[in-house]
Amino acid sequence: MNIAVLCSGNGTNLQAIIDSVKSGYVPAKIALVVSDNKSAFSLTRARTAGIETFVLDPKDFKTREEFDKEVVKNLKKKDVGLVVLAGFMRIISPYFIKEYKNRIINIHPALLPSFKGTRGIKDALDYGVKVTGPTAHFVDEKLDNGPIILQAAVEVKGDDTEEALSQRVHKAEHRIYPEAIKFFVEGRLKIEGRRVKIL
Ligand code: GAR
């Protein structure tokens, strides 16, 4: 199966996926890496691994849907069967979600449904939870809402800083996200309402 990874930033999750594909753990091909930020380090990671990249500047599009139409056109050209959001800091339009229904997944740095949004790690730390951790989930029309594939528990320590906690959450992301992708490409995920069965 061809997959595409969409990223806006550093791309440590992209790197974990690249490594998992290379080792054969994830039986798929990364056909395209898409970014809305031409200076994202994830693009350097992709190019180093010899993966084709596609960059779009949101400023060149009047609406979210126009931007997404251009993305979808390029995903279809590559015959992409799974869209992987990895630190892609944009809301996906209903158009995109319809075109790739149940074929878009995301990694979020908190245990959903807690701490949705763009500051999942800081919000969890500030709230004072004792356990947090990443969530790999399907993407639907609502923000950070779709059916959950995998989660991992990360203990919050008394003297944790955002940086320290962030490092441990990332480490857990790099473990569960490739695993979730592997399950998807192997056809082992079955969505039943809000629940995802792993076959
Ligand atoms: C990850 O921690 C991911 O969970 C988060 O962005 C980071 C990207 O890191 N995503 C969100 O907060 C989405 N709401 P990376 O670029 O090093 O993979």
Image (cartoon, rainbow, N blue to C red):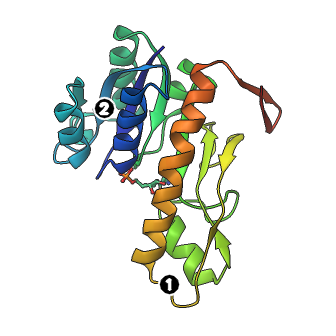
Amino acid tagged 2: Val
**Which quarter of the rendered picture does the C terminus lie within?**
top right
- In the shown orientation, is residue 61 left or right of residue 65? left
Spatial CA span between label 1 and label 2? 33 Å
Find residue 183 and report its horizontal and vertical position in percent: 63, 28
Q: Residues within 10 Å of mark 1 (few under 14, many from 20)?
A: few
**Neighbour tally class for label 2: few under 14, some 14-19, many 20 plus, Cα within 10 Å:** many
Q: Position of residue 97 (x, y in %)?
A: 56, 28
Residue 157 image point, x, y percent: 58, 83
Front-most of residues 162 and 16 = 16
Q: Is residue 44 left or right of residue 197?
A: left
Q: Residue 48 vs residue 111: left or right? A: left
Query: Which residue is disc 1 drawn over?
Result: 160
Residue in the picture at 40% in, 29% down: 23
Question: Ligand 1 closer than 8 Å to the CB at disc 2?
Answer: no
Examine the image and state in which quarter residue 182 appears.
top right
Q: Indicate whether 157 appears above or below 28.
A: below
Q: Ligand 1 sits in which quadrant?
A: bottom left
Query: Residue placed at 41% from the left, 49% from the top?
Result: 87
Residue type of the residue flagged with mark 1: Asp
Foreground disc of the pair 1, 2: 1
Whether label 1 touches label 2, CB < 8 Å? no
